[in-house]
Image (cartoon, rainbow, N blue to C red):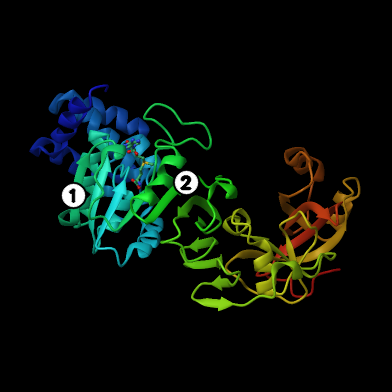
Amino acid sequence: MADPREAVARFEALFSPQGQELLGWLSQQGAALGIDAELRAGAELRARYPADLVVDALAQHELRLRAQPKFGRAGDMFFTRAGLEQASSELVARHRAHRYADAARVADLCCGIGGDAISLARGHRVLAVDRDALHMRMARANAEVYGVAGNLDEAEADVRDVDLTGVQAVFIDPARRTPRRRLRAGDSEPPLGWCLGLAERVDRVGIKAAPGLPREAAPQGWELEFVAVGRDLKEAVVWSPAQATASRRATILPEGYTLARAQDGRVKVAAAEVRTAGVGAVQVRPPGEFLFDPNPAVTRAGLVQELALMIGAWQIDEQIAFLCTDVVTHTPFARVLRVIDSAPWDQKRLPARLRALDIGAVDIRRRGLAGDVDQLHRQLRLSGSRRATLVMTRVSDRPWGLVCLDIDQPGDAAPPR
Ligand SMILES: C[S@@+](CC[C@H](N)C(=O)[O-])C[C@H]1O[C@@H](n2cnc3c(N)ncnc32)[C@H](O)[C@@H]1O
């Protein structure tokens, strides 16, 4: 729909008594209404409701189901496809909103369907700005669902034209796609350079970016935070010096752990702080009994060596982000595996090695070593009783293979060596 006014007018019909009745009926059907049933129901519904209303309500129903992993109140919210795809999840947005705790008035520039605005508006006045009229309208509707609409001031405008007088802190989540297409990697609207320039007007700025953002993109004195939910890397955020508490940070939600390197070189872990002698102290040695696969947020933040110092680990190769110890340590910042076999990479001998270890299934983890994982899976023809992780990597620059077990796996107390 090209005309934004027409899109908003059509959207308003969802709040009419007929629209509410239809959405209510769809929400009672829940996920049970699959795609086929949706098509059949669509035909029946069109006999009772205007065709556009049926199309729009079915689209909202589908998007609400898709939005469930992101929002606790997804079933009552409103989305466009692009708006949902780019929206911050409730969990991530709430984590981020902590940084704004003491700002009385925050601007949420490029607010989209309101994923961040909802979390920011708990306890703050929020100036929410988007040039897309439908997104702006949805942001209000979604803030109503969460009971925070009273704290929202909306402006349907280009963020370049917005007066930021009286705003203490800014959050901006520039678009990484237009409604019709994804922008090239690294591109955003407005571009990162413009977003960084906001700090000349309001000193407290946070900028959301794709997790692939190169570390050099954050200027000196700014913080670069990588946020993962479990091991799923979600986003990068660039914080201006006035909002920064570290130079680089890896945040792992939902547990809420952060590993950060402070501007002065200290390493911060969650609420605690660990003083380190300096990152140069991490050794490079052959694999030990336990292998640590750092969380992608740690790797992207360039904090692997900090993690090594924190858990007393060494690297198996200068270039590879695997760490080892001989004593098991649990850390929220890495997955830990028990190494049961470690040898230079020899693909011919591998099936026999795995058979001898009673391995019947493997997850293959490849880092620093080329190879066709699917083809390798086919070649292995495994039949043992245990599941293992086969790590293809490098040890002091030599191609290497490690066979590892999850440390919680029953029966691994005395692994064959
Ligand atoms: C990534 S989405 C925002 C997602 C939002 N933070 C959320 O959690 O729902 C980007 C939004 O920026 C808006 N946008 C892009 N360029 C803009 C501009 N120059 N001025 C205002 N809004 C803009 C788009 O319309 C889109 O709604």
Is residue 39 rendered to the left or right of residue 190?
Answer: left
Badge 2 element: strand
Q: x, y (%) of residue 287? A: 82, 65
Disc assigned to residue 389: none
The image position of residue 104, as x and y in percent, is 24, 63
Q: Does the residue labelled 2 lie within 8 Å of ligand 1?
A: no
Which residue appears at 87% of the width and 55% of the height? Answer: 353
Q: What residue type is labelled 1?
A: Asp
Which quadrant holds the C terminus? bottom right
Distance from disc 1 to disc 2, alpha carbons, whole Å, reads 24 Å
- Closer to the N terminus: mark 1 or mark 2? 1
Counting other residues with Cα less than 10 Å from the Cα at mark 2, is it few (<14), some (14-19), or many (20 or more)?
many
Quadrant of picture, ligand 1? top left
Q: Is mark 1 within 8 Å of ligand 1?
A: no
Element on which disc 1 rests: strand
Taking 170 as reference, is 349 left or right? Answer: right
123 to the left or right of 277: left
**Observer-nearest of 199 and 380:** 199
**Percent coordinates x, y for residue 388 in the rendering:** 73, 58
Name the amino acid, label 2: Ala
Give the quadrant of residue 248: bottom right
Query: Does the residue at mark 1 contact the one at mark 2 (Cβ under 8 Å)?
Result: no
Q: Can residue 152 be seen in this view?
A: yes
Q: Is residue 88 above or below residue 277?
A: above
Q: Is residue 77 visible?
A: no
Residue 209 is tagged as 2
Residue of label 1: 153
For label 1, the crowd category at 10 Å Cα-Cα, with few meaning under 14, some 14 to 19 and many 20 or more, is some
Residue lying at the far left of the rendered structure: 17
